[in-house]
Image: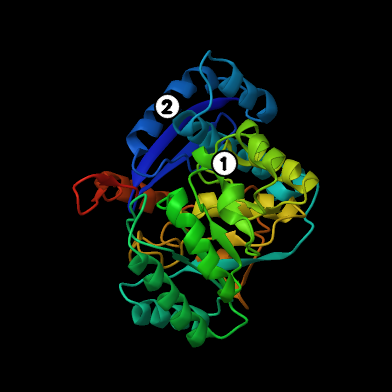
């Protein structure tokens, strides 16, 4: 079997899909994307295709090594996301060739389903609480929300009070047994992070995400000292070498590699195994499309330390006609029940992409960019 073509599709709301074709008619799909840099990653995939066309798609480990090690420069969000999408598609091809889900080729599942969480937002504590109640009514048993809007390196205590008020209202609305996570989103700097974290212990959170940017790994131990809340990060790390530093620091309880950013199934399987050796949990980052989620679920299936999966159904980035299920032939493959989703059992990634709809949507495409925020003094704020 030989690779004959790599075709990319920039589709709304903010995704990039990849189809790899072979001379035996078996095709695989991947999702190589950096949100806000879809066209850049598309170009990186095209550059990788110079080597990949004509190669045997079954030799995934060798192809991964060539894509990563075969050029002088390596790592970073663009290259690793391009590799990730190619890797997902190669595993999809391999699974389809053998008529088995990817998790069977990785050793077989250690779980049948996994818990999922829903993102909730809103402009006031009451709005957030109302969205939380709606998500719980839809069957979710775990929720995540942003901790704060823009926050300067030293900011008003009113920002802290606002988050406390929001969490108080949400916790009162959904009760004590719904899992709540708060994402600092890298917006918070060390002087404010210490105060915020201290105030949040009372809410018995499932985790705090990115209490500081991963660039400041050495300071996380300081800002979380004395807190009982688990700490999660990893969406802006791209390889096992990036995660090695996190694991060796022993300040993180949950890692969140993104299977569309961190080298795909091949790399994230290794990252998950590394984390298990440090007794660190796995919760893959995935506010993306259906191919990325399907890839995550294949790794979740074989990773003992996986405990929850992010997903984008209903997330504000999407929209009713371009949501998570819009490009699937069978949307029921991601049916959620009792706050969980079953591991797909179909061949490859376990999903069927509606190619006609993808092609039609790609005619429109997108140029999604994240918002640019500024503080009251005019300086740029972290989004």
Of the two numbered discs 1 and 2 in the rendering, the one whose residue sits closer to the viewer: 1
Q: Is residue 330 above or below residue 101?
A: below
Using the rendered image of the protein, determine whether residue 350 is visible from the camera's viewpoint.
no
Could you classify mark 2 by the number of other residues whose Cα lies within 10 Å: few (under 14), some (14-19), or many (20 or more)? some
The label number, if any, that marks residue 217 in the structure image: 1
The label number, if any, that marks residue 169 in the structure image: none
Relative placement, left or right, of 261 versus 38 is: right
Pinpoint residue 10: horizontal percent, then vertical percent: 35, 42
Relative placement, left or right, of 36 versus 288 is: left
Pinpoint residue 21: horizontal percent, then vertical percent: 52, 34
**Element assignment for label 2:** helix
Could you classify mark 1 by the number of other residues whose Cα lies within 10 Å: few (under 14), some (14-19), or many (20 or more)? some
Residue 227: name its quadrant.
Answer: bottom right
Q: Is residue 63 above or below residue 299?
A: above
Residue 132: name its quadrant.
Answer: bottom left
- As measured in the structure, the alpha-carbon distance from the residue carrying label 1 to the one carrying label 2 is 29 Å
**Element assignment for label 1:** helix
The label number, if any, that marks residue 44 in the structure image: 2
Name the one closer to the observer, 213 or 323. Answer: 213
């Amino acid at each position: 079997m030989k690779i004959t073509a790599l075709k990319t599709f920039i589709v709304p709301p903010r995704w990039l899909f990849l189809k790899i074709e072979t001379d035996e008619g078996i095709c695989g799909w991947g999702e190589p994307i950096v949100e806000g840099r879809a066209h850049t990653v598309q170009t990186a995939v095209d550059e990788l295709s110079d080597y990949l066309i004509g190669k045997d798609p079954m030799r995934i480990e060798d192809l991964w090594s060539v894509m990563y090690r075969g050029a002088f420069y390596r790592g970073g969000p663009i290259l690793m996301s391009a590799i990730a999408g190619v890797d997902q598609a190669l595993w999809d091809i391999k699974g389809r060739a053998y008529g088995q889900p990817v998790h069977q080729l990785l050793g077989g599942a250690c779980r049948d389903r996994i818990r999922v969480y829903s993102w909730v937002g809103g402009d006031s504590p009451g709005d957030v609480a109302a969205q939380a109640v709606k998500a719980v009514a839809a069957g979710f048993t775990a929720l995540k929300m942003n901790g704060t809007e823009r926050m300067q390196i030293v900011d008003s205590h009113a920002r802290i009070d606002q988050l406390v008020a929001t969490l108080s209202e949400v916790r009162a609305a959904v009760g004590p047994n719904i899992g709540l996570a708060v994402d600092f989103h890298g917006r918070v700097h060390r002087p404010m992070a210490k105060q915020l974290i201290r105030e949040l212990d009372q809410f018995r959170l499932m985790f705090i995400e990115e209490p500081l940017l991963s660039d400041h790994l050495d300071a996380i131990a300081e800002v979380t000292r004395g807190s009982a809340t688990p700490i999660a990060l990893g969406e802006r790390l791209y390889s096992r070498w990036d995660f090695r530093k996190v694991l060796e620091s022993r300040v993180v309880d949950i890692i969140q590699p993104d299977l569309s950013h961190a080298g795909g199934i091949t790399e994230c399987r290794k990252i998950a195994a590394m984390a298990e050796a440090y007794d660190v949990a796995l919760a893959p980052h995935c506010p993306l499309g259906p191919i990325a989620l399907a890839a995550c679920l294949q790794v979740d299936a074989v990773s003992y330390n996986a405990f929850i999966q992010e997903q984008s159904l209903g997330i504000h980035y999407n929209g009713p006609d371009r949501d998570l299920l819009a490009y699937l032939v069978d949307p029921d493959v991601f049916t959620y029940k009792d706050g969980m989703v079953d591991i797909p059992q179909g061949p490859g990634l376990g999903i069927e992409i509606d190619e006609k709809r993808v092609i039609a949507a790609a005619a429109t495409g997108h140029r999604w960019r994240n918002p640019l925020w500024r503080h009251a003094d005019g300086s740029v704020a972290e989004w």
